[in-house]
Image: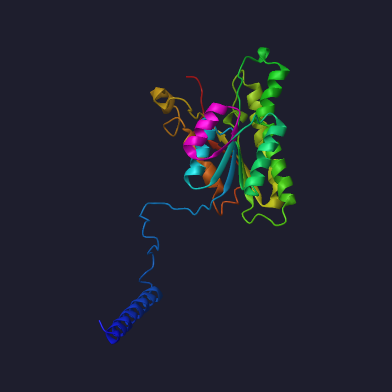
Amino acid sequence: MGRRKIQDNAIQLNYMADNYLEKKMEDLRSGRLAGVKSNSSLRRGVWCVPFPCRRVFVTGGARGIGRAIVEEFSRIGCKVAFCDADEVSGAETAYSTGARFIHADVSDTDALKKSMDILFTAWRDIDIIINNVGVGDFKPFGETTAEDFQKVIDVNLKPVFVTAHALAAHRESLPYPNDFGGRIINIASTRHMQSEAGTVAYSASKGGVVSLTHSLMMDMSKYRITVNSISPGWIETGDYDLLRPEDHSQHPSGRVGRPADVARLCVFLSAVGNDFINGADIPVDGGMTRKMIYID
C-alpha cells in the first residue's frame, strides 16, 4: 500500500471518528443519552456505591460478628486489620480474608494502643474503627463478683474510650487533616434497653457503650469523625441450620439475624456521604425491641 493510500485512509478514519463524536455530543445535548450509564457492567437492579480503599481497624475480628465485619470490608477492597486474643482463629481469619491480624488482648490498654501504633506507622492513619470485641460472662447475680463485673467493663467498654482517644491524639499530630474525616462504630447490644436476670455486667457495659458513643460524637466532631453504635439482637454465630422454626417466627422480620446483617450496616455507615448519621444507636434485631410481649 502506497504512502498516499495510507494517508487517505487515515483522513477517512479521522473524519469518521469526528462524525461519531459530533453525533454523540448532539445526542447528549438533546437528552437522547439521558439515563445511559457510562459503566457497561452495571445492570438494572444493581446498587453500586462508591467506596474508596479505606483503612479499617476492627477489635475482636477473629470470629462471629467481628469476622463478618472483617470479611465485608475486605471484600469491598479496604485495607483491613483486626486484633483478637484468639491467636488460632485470628490467624485463620487473616489467611482467609487477606486482612492483617494483630494478636492482642483489648483489656490490656498498652497492648491495644500498640496495635494502633503499628497501623499508624504502616498506614499513616486509620479511617474507620469498629469496636466490636465483647464478652458476656452471664451468671446469677449472687455469683457475680466485683472482679467479674470489672473484667466485662474492661473488655466491652474501656476499649471504646482507648481507641477513640488514640485516634484523636494521632489526628492532632498530623500536619494535615484527613480529607475523609472518619468513622467510629461501636457494637453495643439490645441488652442495654432489655434485660434478663444474670446479665448485670454485660447490660451495664453495653449501656455504657451507647452513652459513650454520643459523648464521643461531640469530642470527635473537630476531626470530622462520626461516632455511632449498633445494637444487635439475636445474631446467630453458631450453626444457623440448628435453629428451630419458632426461633425465626418470633421475630417480626421472620428470621434470626446473621453476622452479615451487622457487617452490612457497618459498611453503610462508613460509605461516602453518610456523615449526617451521628451519635445514633441503631438496633439490628429483626424488630424484637419494638415487639410487645406478654404471656398469654
- The foreground one among 210 and 156 is 156
Left or right of 260, for residue 143: right
Residue at 64%, 47% in the rendered image: 226
Taking 240 as reference, is 26 above or below it?
below
Decide which of 219, 78 is in the foreground and name it: 78
Residue depicted at 49% across the width and 41% down the height: 72
State yes or no: residue 93 in magenta: yes
Whether the magenta-drawn stretch holds residue 220 is answered as: no
Residue lying at 51% horizontally and 43% vertically, measured from the top left: 73
Percent of width and height locating residue 52: 53, 53
Q: Nearer the viewer, residue 80 or 223?
A: 80
Q: Is residue 295 left or right of residue 172?
A: left
Name the one closer to the observer, 105 or 270: 105
Q: Quadrant of residue 211?
A: top right
Q: Residue furthest left?
A: 1
Whether residue 76 sits left or right of residue 26 in the image: it is right
Residue range of the region highlighted in magenta in the rendering: 83-101
Q: Quadrant of residue 255?
A: top left
Looking at the image, residue 106 lies above or below residue 182:
above
